[in-house]
Amino acid sequence: MFIIDELLLAPLKMFTEIVEKIRDMAENELYGEDKIKNELLKLQLMLET
């Protein structure tokens, strides 16, 4: 019985893993250290001009 359950739920588990991976990548893009450093550098350059 458990094998059938695993086979039926496998697509849902894979979809969940893909969505979590996309979420992690988006968070890194928005809040990553490189992004923050670039924004601070832009602000500093704007302040100096």
Image: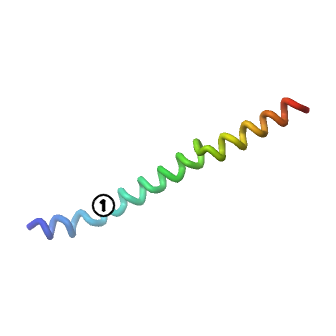
Q: Position of residue 7 (x, y in %)?
A: 21, 69
Q: Amino acid at mark 1?
A: Leu
Give the quarter of the image for residue 30. top right
Relative to 15, 30 lies left or right: right
Compared with 14, 37 (above or below) is: above
For image coordinates 54% across by 50% down, the residue present is: 26
Kind of element beneath mark 1: helix
Q: Is 40 placed left or right of 30 in the picture?
A: right
Q: Quick check: 5 above or below 23? A: below
Above or below, 10 against 20 in this view is: below
**Quadrant of residue 9 in the image?**
bottom left
Q: Position of residue 47 (x, y in %)?
A: 84, 29
> Furthest-top residue in view?
47
Residue 2: horizontal and vertical position, in percent?
12, 65
Picture coordinates of residue 48, whole percent (x, y): 88, 31
Residue lying furthest left: 1
Q: Is residue 33 left or right of residue 16?
A: right
Badge 1: how crowded within 10 Å, few (<14), some, or many (20+)? few
Q: Which quadrant of the rendered structure holds the N terminus?
A: bottom left
Q: How many marks?
A: 1
Name the quadrant of the C terminus: top right
Residue at image position (30%, 60%) is 13
Q: Please tell me whether residue 45 is drawn above or below residue 13 in the rendered image.
A: above
The residue identified by callout 1 is 12
Which residue is at the front of the view, 5 or 46?
46
Q: Residue furthest right?
A: 49
Identity of the residue drawn at 55% across and 48% down:
28
Q: How is the image coloured?
A: rainbow
Judged left or right of residue 46, residue 37 is left
